[in-house]
DNA sequence: CTACTTCCCGTAGGGTATACGGAATCATGC
DNA sequence: GCATGATTCCGTATACCCTACGGGAAGTAG
């Protein structure tokens, strides 16, 4: 096997390496500047606005010049993602709940400041300082419960998935509000005729019962928030419970 | 407010309405055929392959002819999604756990047969028969626990989110394997130099401890499966527990 | 001044969705 | 047989996207 080593790792970890001696024509830009500009554009107009052409134009440089700093666009996106992951500056000396709360708050704040994160796949994320700091933080948070090291991964992954999934979802809703000009509630109102013209009452008895009980009033975004907090609570309780059981087993 | 009513609803619910009298030039195709062709292309080559041009070519028709059947491409995607949602044929007379298991199995099977679902946003889904059948099924499943109707929505949403999120994630991994030609494990192997050349042991004590304990062996896809089953278990336990508490309260 | 290194960038090509307006094709009524 | 109206069909034209290639430009070191 030819063991191809991707060019992205030195870029992701560029800050942990000392600057090279200056040789050859000095660069007009830097990776940091390119990434920061791309993030700024994506924040304002969505990920597609951070095209190679737009970023280059913003920096008064020809499109192809960017390829001196970044191998290709997917790598640029990786760098953008790890940058904002790292910027959360996750750190805490609190207990389990405090750490999870900090993680959730910072992650939601990140998605709100950078909604384009919802346009990026969370599978095979950039393995840079930001992503590794997140892993370390969540594993350390679960470790405060006293679980053995080989039992940390599952709970940490479950919590991170739930939180990130919810933040992702909310950010996607925000993007849709911007691109369509409609809030989620307005979008539902547009589909109001569904209930009068198309909905089959007999095929949906449970929904009809809920409707008749008047339990369908709250806005969609609120409901999503609600379901997130509810699910997170269940996960944390379950994890804490299994940890205390495990501790008792070890004592006896 | 002008109360715009979207043209997509009659298309989504086209099967619950009798065929119109034939007037004018008879159509060469039908909505069903267009949607089925688009699904077939997307199954084989990804959602982008189901472009208006490709679908039209597949049907030996000019691109613009499709616009007589479907208002635009986003609506076509909505129709594709609701079609495969509906095809799960969710139905069960079992208890809570059996219904949830059926839902999870069918949903994973759906994402495996149609991995392009992972390329579609789950926010503001098509409000067609397939999506409403899913809602009804999950709400009825939770109702078997004896909860009052105004308490069904939160648990149902939480379960559906967790299951769909996991299936979505798995499908995205499958798509990446196809487009990159690399499995998740091969992708990690490519980044093997991360640990030797870039990883900072002192900044990541917990990860290092796990590593030293040899608890990092299993493949990434396996771990994801594992975390999904673990989290689902916690959610179901928590929901069942709160339902039984609620029942006891009502009795006393 | 001569290497050597590195940055800068013009060109060219194949993809995408869809507004517009006119031609083609059918059922119906007389 | 023919006019009418409804509906389907479709050619054209536009503005973006990413990036392989290769040569010119601008520095430093000796």
Image (cartoon, coloured by chain):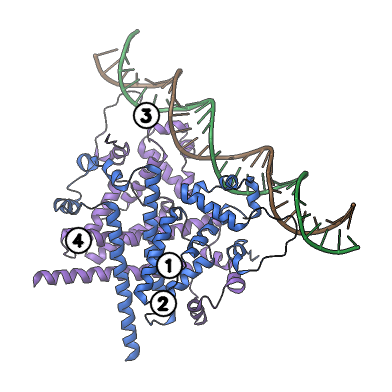
Chain colours: A purple, B blue, C green, D brown
Question: Which callout, 3 or 4, points to the residue nearer the camera?
Answer: 4
Residue topped by disc 2: B93
Q: Is residue A233 visible?
A: no
* Disc 2: CA contacts within 10 A as few (<14), some (14-19) or many (>=20): few
Task: Have a look at marks 2 and 3 and say if they share a chain.
Answer: no
The residue to which callout 1 is attached is: A224
Give the SS element for disc 1: helix
Residue A166 falls in which quadrant of the image? bottom left
Q: Position of residue A17 (x, y in %)?
A: 24, 37
Instruction: Give the side of residue A117 with respect to residue B74, left or right.
Output: left
Mark 1 / mark 4, whichever is N-terminal: 4
| Residue bearing the label numbered 4 | A151
For discs 1 and 4, the disc positioned in front in the rendered view: 4
Q: Circle 4 sits in a helix, a strand or a loop, which is it?
A: helix
Mark 2–mark 1 distance (CA, rounded to whole Å): 28 Å
Mark 1 or mark 3, which has the lower sequence index? 3
Say what secondary structure mark 3 lies in. loop
Query: Dot 4, how many residues are within 10 Å of its Cα: few (below 14), some (14-19), or many (20+)?
Result: some
Q: Are marks 2 and 3 in contact (CB under 8 Å)?
A: no
Q: Answer above or below: position of B181 versus B94.
A: above
Q: Chain of mark 2?
A: B
Residue B177, visible in the rendered structure? yes
User: What residue lies at 34% left-to-right and 83% top-to-bottom?
Assistant: B246
Say above or below: B186 vs B84: above
Q: Kindly indicate whether the residue at mark 1 contacts the one at mark 2 (C-beta within 8 angstroms).
A: no
Q: Is residue C25 left or right of residue C9?
A: right
């Amino acid at each position: 096997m030819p063991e191809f080593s991707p060019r992205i790792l030195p870029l992701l970890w560029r800050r942990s390496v000392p600057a090279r001696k200056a040789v050859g024509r000095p660069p007009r830009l830097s990776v940091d500047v390119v990434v920061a500009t791309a993030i700024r554009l994506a924040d304002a107009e969505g990920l597609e606005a951070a095209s190679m052409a737009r970023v280059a134009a913003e920096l008064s440089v020809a499109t192809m010049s960017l390829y001196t700093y970044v191998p290709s666009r997917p790598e640029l996106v990786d760098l953008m993602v790890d940058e904002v992951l790292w910027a959360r500056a996750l750190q805490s000396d609190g207990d389990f709940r405090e750490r999870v709360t900090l993680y959730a708050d910072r992650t939601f704040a990140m998605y709100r400041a950078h909604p384009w994160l919802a346009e990026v796949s969370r599978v095979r994320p950039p393995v840079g300082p930001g992503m590794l700091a997140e892993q370390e933080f969540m594993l350390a948070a679960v470790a405060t419960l006293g679980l053995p090291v080989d039992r940390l991964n599952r709970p940490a992954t479950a919590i991170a998935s739930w939180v990130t999934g919810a933040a992702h979802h909310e950010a996607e809703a925000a993007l849709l509000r911007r691109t369509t000009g409609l809030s989620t509630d307005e979008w539902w109102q547009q589909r109001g005729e569904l209930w009068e013209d198309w909905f089959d009452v007999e095929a949906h008895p449970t929904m009809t019962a809920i409707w008749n009980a008047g339990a369908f009033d709250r806005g969609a975004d609120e409901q999503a928030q609600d379901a997130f907090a509810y699910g997170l609570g269940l996960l944390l309780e379950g994890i804490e419970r299994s940890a205390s059981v495990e501790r008792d087993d070890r004592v006896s």
